[in-house]
Amino acid sequence: MTQLNQQQITERLSRDLNIQHLSPQEQKEIITQMSTVLLDRITIALIAELPQTEMSRIDMLLEHDQTEAVQALLAKNIPNSNEVAEEVINTTLKEFEELVNNKSLDE
Amino acid sequence: MEKINNSNIKKEIPDEGHGDYKKALYVDNKYFEILKEKGVSEAKNYRMRANIKSEYYDTYARLINEGKQKEAYKLAKKHAKTISGAAAKNHRERREGKYKDIRRDRNEENNTKQIEEHVKTIQKKQEVEDGTRHTQTSNNNTNIIPPGTFDDTLDNTPNNTPTNNEEVGGVRSYKDILRGVEEMKGAALLEYYRKITGEKNPTIPTGSSFEKLTKKWNVLKKASLYTIMGSLPALGVVAGGVLTGGASLWIHTLATLGGSMTGVAMSSIINKVGSKSGSRLHDMQALRGLEELNKRLNNKGYLPKPKYNILHQSLRELFGHRPQRNRRLTEISRGDLYYILNSGSLKEKKLQKNIKLVSVVLSLLTAGLAHQFLAPTDTATNEAAPAPTIPPHSTTEQSIKAPIFDGKSFMKNITDFWGNFFTFDGKTMPGFSAPHVPNCYSPKSLLT
C-alpha cells in the first residue's frame, strides 16, 4: 500500500526540485512558493483556453463567489484541463530546474 | 514567622484532584524554592504543614498562631500524609542531585548536536557558494521512499532526474532560489486582469477595486484547482488510492499546502492526523474523501438522520462499538479510520472487523465520490454538478434506501460489489477491480 507521509512528500518534491541541499525549513518555503507559482500559472493557462465571451460570464460568477459554477464552466470549456495542468507543471518545473542548477541570477 | 491559617495551608498545596504523587512532587518543588529563598528552617516548616492531613489544618494553624510551635510540629508529624514511595524516591534523588546531572547531560548532548548541525549547514552553504557540486544524487534518495510504494514509471515529470545536474553545474543558494521563484511568480494577477478586460496593457486598479479583483482572482484559483483535481484521473486518490506521478503529486501538494480544497478545517485535520497517526498519506486521502462525502451528503456537515442511522448501525455492528449520537460522520470516521489504520498489532478478530469496516467506508466513498471526481460531469447548464447517480451495483444506495438495516445482507452486497477485495479472513487480500462501475478506478493499487 502506498504510504507516503508529509515528510516523504516533501522529500520527494525536494528531490524533484533538486533543493535537498537546503535546510528543511527552506525546502518547505520553496515548495510552498512553487505551489503558488504553479497554481497561478495553471489558472492563467486555463483561462487562456477560454473564449473571451466566457470570461465575462466567469467574471460575473466570480463577483458572486460562485466557485462551483466557475468550476463547472471551466470543466465544460476545457475538457483537457488535466493536460493543461500537467503541461504547466512540467514546463514550470523545467524552468525551476534551470534556475536551481545552471544560470546565475546575477548574470 | 508569618501567621498561618487554614487557607494559607490550602494555598500551599496543589488542587484537589491531583494524585498523591503529584502533590508530593509539588511540595518537593516548593520545599526547594523555600529552601533557596528562606533557608532550611522555613522549608522544613513548609513541608511539615503541607503534608499535614487536611482535617488537621485548622488545629495546626491555631497552634502556630498561638505560638505553640512544638505542639504544632508534633501534630504535623503525627498526622502527616504518607509520601508515596515514588515521590520519596524522587525527593531523595533530587536531593542527591541526580536530576541536575541528567539535565546537564541532556543539555550538553543537545548543544553538541546543535553545534554539529550548525557546522554541517555552514559547510553545505560554503560548498554551494564555492560552486562545489552538491553530489547528493538519487542513489541517496532511494531510501526515502521504500521500493514499491511509488510507481516511478508513471512519473512523467521531466526534472525528476537529479543526475542531470551533474552535467549542468552548481546549485543555487536558498536566497537565489527564492529570488528566482519570486521572479517566476510574475504578474499572474495582471494576466488575469488583462484577460477579463480584453486590454493589452490595462492598469491594475487600486484601493477597494484592487481588493475586489484580488478576491475574484483567489476564487478563480480555487475553482481552477477544483477543476484540475476533478479531471485528473490520478485524483481517484481522493478515495484512498495511489499517487501516480510528479504532476498529480504536485496537485495534491497544492491542495494540501494551500489548504484550498476544503479550507482551514481540512488543513487542520490533515495536520492533526498527520502528526498523530504517523502521517500516512492514505489516511489523509481517506479522510479528505470522507470530508468530501460528508459535504456532498449534507451541506450542513451532518448526515441526514436515516443515512446517519445506517452508518451508525453499520459501524456498531462491524466495529463493535457504538459511536455517539449526533457525532459528525467525519468525526466517527476519523476516529475509526485512525484506529483501523493503526491496528497492525490488533488481534485477528478485531482486525477482521476493521477490514470489514474499511470496505464499508470505501464503498461509501466510491458511491459518494466516483461521480463527482471520476465520472464525466454534465456542465452544459453551467450549474453545479448534478446529484450523483449511484451505480446500480452500489451497496451504499441499497443500504441507504433500505428501511431496516440488515447487516448480513449489507455485508453480502459489499462482498458482491467489491469482489475479492477483502476475503474477510483478515489474512489474504488479493487484488480487486470493479469493472461494472463505469470509470471506477481500481483499488487494486491500494494493496500493491
Image (cartoon, rainbow, N blue to C red):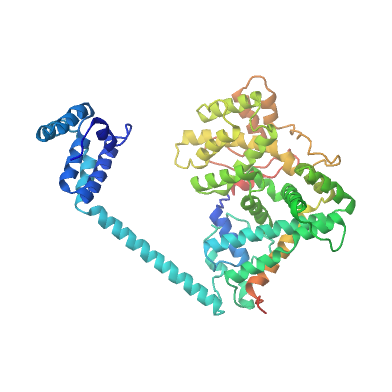
Q: Nearer the viewer, residue B84 or B40?
A: B40
Q: Is residue B187 left or right of residue B4?
A: right
Residue A96: name its quadrant: bottom right
Left or right of A12? Residue A42 is: right
Where B349 falls versus B133 (above or below)?
Answer: above
The location of residue B172, given as percent across then percent down, is 60, 73
| Residue for point 54% across, 56% down | A7
Q: Position of residue B268 (x, y in %)?
A: 57, 45
**Viewer-nearest residue: A95 or A37:** A37
Q: Quadrant of residue A60?
A: top right
* Residue B25: % across, % down: 27, 42
Image quadrant occupied by the N terminus of chain B: top left
* Residue toward you, B186 or B267: B186
Residue B407 visible in the shown view: yes
x then y, percent, for residue A31: 61, 60
Q: Is residue B277 above or below residue B80?
A: below
* Residue B383 occupies quadrant: top right
How many discs appear? 0
Q: Residue at the location (50% across, 36% down)?
A: B351
Residue pushed farthest right? A53
Q: Is residue B93 visible?
A: no
Of all residues, the one furthest to the top in this rendering is B404
